[in-house]
Amino acid sequence: MSRSLITFNYTWKVLTLPLDYTAIERILPHRYPFLLVDRVTELEPDKRIVGIKNISLNERYLSHNTGEPPSLPPTILTEAVAQVGAILILSKPENREKLIYFMGIERVRFRQPVHPGDVVEIEAIVRRLRSRMGVLSGRARVNGKIVCHGTMTFALGERTAGAPSNES
């Protein structure tokens, strides 16, 4: 069964895969240039998610070192993995009005640089999930090769007055 044909009918919104940039903006509070996920291709609630980040030469945060091709900084790649995981958590109806906080990372390894023209496939898998906290493991691949992997801890908090809304 192709995951791109799956539809999730929640009371607040119907999610039809693949999720495009506009649909992702309805889930995450991030906006350009800080929204780092271009598309979500697979989503299994409470289990796993796969997202895509296309690396362009126009990315404002590429590092340019003399004599080397531009590359995506590892911190930006780590944030992209965290955002894919956040989409998985915030897409649940009970979490729609909450904010997600990146609490920590463990055992993150960067295996090779990511360059303009690369398509990064990011997978996040739930390791532990509670009502207000959880742990995800994440992997980023380019052409099937792992370029980054690690474990991330998150916390959910209530939205306060004046906090940005996920709905735009």
Image (tube, rainbow, N blue to C red):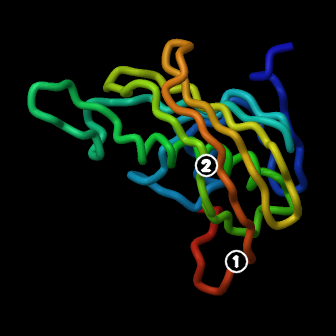
Q: Is disc 2 surrounded by few (<14), some (14 to 19) or many (20+) residues within 10 Å?
A: few
Residue 134, quarter of picture:
bottom right
Look at the picture and state if 42 lies above or below 137: above
For disc 1, the marked residue is: 159
Name the one closer to the observer, 154 or 91: 154
- The mark that comes first in sequence, 1 or 2, is 2
Residue at mark 1 to residue at mark 2: CA–CA distance: 27 Å
The residue depicted at 82 percent of the width and 67 percent of the height is: 132
Disc number for residue 106: 2
**The N terminus sits in image quarter:** top right
Mark 1 falls on what kind of element? loop
At which x and y percent is residue 34? 43, 54
Disc number for residue 48: none
The residue depicted at 67 percent of the width and 63 percent of the height is: 100
Mark 2 falls on what kind of element? strand
Residue 138, quarter of picture:
top right
Q: Is disc 1 surrounded by few (<14), some (14 to 19) or many (20+) residues within 10 Å?
A: some
At which x and y percent is residue 15? 78, 41
Q: Amino acid at mark 1?
A: Arg
Say whether residue 52 is left or right of residue 66: right
